[in-house]
Amino acid sequence: MPAADQYEYMYFLGMDVPDGTTVVTGPSQSIFNTLTDPDTSGETLVDDPITWSGSILPVKLYGFASNGDPVLQIVGGLTFYYLVSDLDSWEGQPLGFSRSGSYTYCFLPGCQIATPAGEVSVERLTIGDPVLTVDGRSVAIKWIGRQTVSTRFGPAERLMPVRFAAGALGPGLPHADLTVTADHGMLVGGVICHAGALVNGGTITRVPLAEMGKSYTVYHVETENHEIILANGAPAETFIDNAGRRAFDNYAEFEALYGEVPEMQELPYPRAMSARQVPDRIRAMLARRESRGGCVA
């Protein structure tokens, strides 16, 4: 993170530990709050001490709101929690709190999703639109979630999207460069592999945050059941609710449409969430693709 970041609004969260159900009640204050990281390592992680201009008491970064804004813990005679933000719209909204940064299973704008009528950019899809699964079925979109990801706080590597060069996963897989979030699952060799676990520095790379600006928007496609659909021709999972929906900017829309829903059943594929969990045979296949330059055919 930069040596200092300034935020205009402050919200008092109270004395209870924030969680995903916390509702911010405000009031907001139009004052500039400066956060400074005394550590020069370049990263501000959960539980790191920081300096906050709004407090003379010890402060640490306790976690993140759904859009990446920091939640501060201030310890004196009692322990208090605050949210600082550039936004004046948190009042009355669910916090969508995370102690480990933003976990997103999403596509970035421009990803082409296969439909019966041809490919459509993910940001143009709407509820009810049909999409094609990897086995050729047509299923309806239940919801399109949007999430704004802030690049200012949190472990930089987790916030970096992952870019698959054309042909990185096999002939025509994908048929054009594909960018997804690091936690998005790609079906490779019968295993759902998180994109970040497949990074090889050649045909599969992390996108530097400098290219993403202060924030960027991602989209998730949710169907009634967990499915494998095609993104730029490559098999990619639809949303699975083990990460929760509250982190999405338009969660209120889902809640209004569907209310409480049963937990989704995950597809019966093994899942590799980290590089060490990726089977050797898949590593070897990706290495062969890399040595060929990720050619499409």
Image (spheres, rainbow, N blue to C red):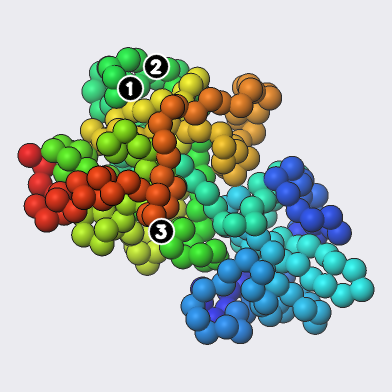
Per the image, the residue denoted by label 1 is 133
Apparent side of residue 153 relative to residue 212 in the rendered image (left or right) = right
Classed neighbour count for the residue bearing mark 2: other residues with Cα under 10 Å, few (<14), some (14–19), many (≥20)? some
Amino acid under label 2? Answer: Val
Between 198 and 125, which is closer to the camera in this rendering?
198
**Residue at figure coordinates x 61%, y 84% from the top left:** 38
Confirm whether residue 155 shows in the render.
yes
Q: CA distance from mark 2 to mark 3?
A: 30 Å
Position of the C terminus by quadrant? top left
Q: Quadrant of residue 54?
A: bottom right
**Residue at figure coordinates x 87%, y 75% from the top left:** 76
**Residue at figure coordinates x 23%, y 33% from the top left:** 233
Amino acid under label 1? Answer: Thr
Q: CA distance from mark 1 to mark 2?
A: 7 Å
Between 182 and 153, which is closer to the camera in this rendering?
182
Q: Are marks 1 and 2 in contact (CB under 8 Å)?
A: yes
Query: Mark 3 or mark 2, which is nearer the start of the sequence?
Result: 2
Per the image, the residue denoted by label 2 is 139
Q: Quadrant of residue 49?
A: bottom right
Per the image, the residue denoted by label 3 is 160
